Image: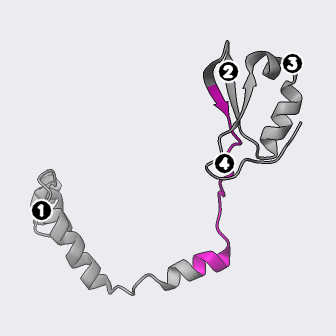
């Protein structure tokens, strides 16, 4: 069996359901090597076999360092102001929580709280 992967844009190799059943190990090995197949039953296309995409689950320290260098420096006060600006415009934000964080409640109000 030919195990070359089709060129981009080239259609997958067509195989029948019977061929898949009889030569499944050989066909799965070809899929693992990058070949794609179009499976038919009674001449009708019923599905495709394609290699699984391999996804990286990590980045290297060097990649992280390169990304981190692109992040602009932010002053805490500026960041806090920007966050407050968006929170103030949030209709679901609890104003009592914000007042409490600012210390706008007296000790008696907090004790009753």
Q: Magenta stretch containing residue 49, yes or no?
A: yes
Label 3, label 2: how many angstroms apart (C-alpha)? 14 Å
Residue occupied by mark 2: 40
Earlier sequence position, callout 3 versus callout 1: 3
- In this rendering, the answer to whether 79 lies above or below 111 is below
Picture mark count: 4
Label 4, label 3: how many angstroms apart (C-alpha)? 26 Å
Earlier sequence position, callout 4 versus callout 2: 2
Q: Is residue 44 left or right of residue 31?
A: left
- In this rendering, the answer to whether 103 lies above or below 6 is below
Q: Do the CB atoms of the residues marked 1 and 2 lie less than 8 Å apart?
A: no
Label 3, residues with CA under 10 Å away: few <14, some 14-19, many ≥20:
few
In this picture the colour scheme is one colour
Label 3, label 1: how many angstroms apart (C-alpha)? 64 Å
Residue occupied by mark 4: 53
Q: Which residues are magenta?
A: 47-65
Earlier sequence position, callout 3 versus callout 2: 3
Image coordinates of residue 33 in percent, x first then y, are: 82, 46
Image coordinates of residue 99 in percent, x first then y, are: 13, 64
Q: Nearer the viewer, residue 37 or 61?
A: 37
Secondary structure state at the residue bearing disc 3: helix
Label 1, label 2: how many angstroms apart (C-alpha)? 57 Å
Residue occupied by mark 3: 22
Q: Nearer the viewer, residue 60 or 93?
A: 60
Secondary structure state at the residue bearing disc 2: strand
The residue drawn where x is 24% and y is 70% is 83
Image coordinates of residue 105 in percent, x first then y, are: 11, 65
Residue occupied by mark 1: 89
């Amino acid at each position: 069996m030919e195990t070359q992967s089709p060129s981009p844009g080239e259609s997958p190799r067509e195989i029948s359901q019977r061929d898949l059943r009889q030569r499944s190990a050989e066909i799965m090995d070809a899929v693992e090597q990058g070949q794609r197949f179009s499976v038919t039953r009674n001449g009708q296309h019923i599905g495709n076999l394609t290699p699984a995409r391999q996804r990286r689950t990590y980045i290297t320290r060097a990649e992280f360092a390169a990304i981190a260098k692109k992040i602009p420096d932010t002053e805490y006060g500026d960041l806090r102001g920007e966050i407050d600006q968006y929170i103030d415009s949030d209709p679901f934000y609890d104003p009592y929580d914000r007042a409490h964080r600012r210390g706008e409640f007296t000790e008696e109000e907090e004790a009753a709280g």
